[in-house]
Image (cartoon, grey):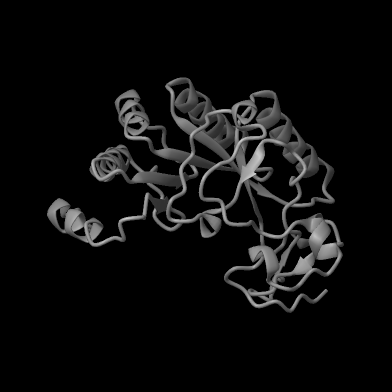
């Protein structure tokens, strides 16, 4: 069982460069697996905020946090990125969209994190279109992260056939970003955030034509992949090789 040693954690945080203004929590260690995990991440957000560092949480919201945890995270400037996709069940989406709305209503930075894809399956395509419409209709600032599927994944026949093999994970099929022309999709994944990144806006309309500090490029778009833009200019593939194959 993992145990949290606050003293050791604080010592490690104090060794960070002075310009590091945010830290990520998520992907392999989702904080939503239990109420205790939510409470711990709220404690961590408070520790970081005392050092002027914000916590960027990525979660699939397997359980909802208590109102007290939400209030603590909001007060300590945490950014809540909630992963959503067309593959989610109705119950999963209800939890995830509810938390996004409740968190922002409490004054927090709530970011829908759309796991996007080009689906040939009409139901899945409609699901994704509905999520994009929900993000736009509710004026959310959003981020997009293209889904990748292994070549032997059973869902491959349900995808459009105009995708690409990923330049780094060459057995994985993807499409790049699909919503670069949608005003709300302003935020890149954490790999494209600089140390001084901060999010001063809660809504897409507030951020319109304004600078969000610390953005450093983004993942490539579907259009760029179609045009075979493979050079690293603009940080399109910051952590990948640049050989794209069909």
Residue 25: x %, y % from top left? 39, 51
Q: Is residue 122 above or below residue 175?
A: above
What residue occupies the far left of the structure in this picture? 7
Q: Which residue is found at the position 33% from the left and 46% from the top?
A: 53
Q: Which residue is found at the position 36% from the left and 43% from the top?
A: 54
Comparing 95 with 239, the one in front is 239
Q: Which residue is found at the position 60% from the left and 35% from the top?
A: 141
Residue 43: x %, y % from top left? 24, 40
Q: Is residue 102 something one can see in this rendering? A: yes
Q: Is residue 37 above or below residue 240?
A: above
Residue 174: x %, y % from top left? 73, 62
Left or right of residue 72, residue 166 in this image: right
| Quadrant into which the N terminus falls | bottom left
Left or right of residue 35, residue 174 in this image: right
| Quadrant into which the C terminus falls | bottom right
Left or right of residue 75, residue 246 in this image: right
């Amino acid at each position: 069982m993992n145990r949290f040693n606050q003293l050791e954690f604080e010592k490690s945080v104090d060794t960070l460069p002075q310009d590091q203004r945010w830290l990520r929590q998520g992907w392999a260690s989702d904080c939503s697996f239990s109420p205790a995990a939510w409470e711990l991440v709220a404690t961590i957000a408070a520790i970081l905020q005392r050092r002027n560092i914000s916590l960027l949480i990525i979660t699939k919201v397997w359980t909802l946090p208590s109102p007290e945890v939400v209030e603590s995270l909001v007060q300590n400037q945490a950014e809540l990125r909630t992963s959503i996709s067309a593959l989610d069940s109705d119950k999963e989406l209800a939890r995830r969209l509810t938390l996004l709305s409740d968190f922002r209503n409490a004054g927090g930075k709530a970011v829908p994190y759309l796991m996007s894809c080009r689906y040939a399956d009409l139901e899945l395509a409609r699901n994704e279109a509905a999520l994009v419409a929900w993000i736009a209709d509710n004026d959310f600032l959003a981020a997009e992260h293209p889904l990748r599927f292994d070549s032997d994944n059973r869902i491959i026949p349900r995808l459009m056939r105009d995708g690409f093999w990923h330049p780094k994970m060459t057995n994985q099929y993807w499409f790049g970003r699909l919503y670069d022309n949608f005003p709300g999709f302003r935020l890149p994944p954490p790999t494209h955030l600089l140390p001084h990144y901060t999010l001063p806006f809660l809504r897409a309309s507030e951020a319109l034509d304004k600078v969000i500090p610390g953005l450093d490029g983004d993942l490539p778009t579907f259009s760029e992949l179609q045009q075979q833009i493979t050079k690293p200019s603009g940080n399109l593939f910051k952590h990948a090789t640049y050989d794209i194959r069909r």
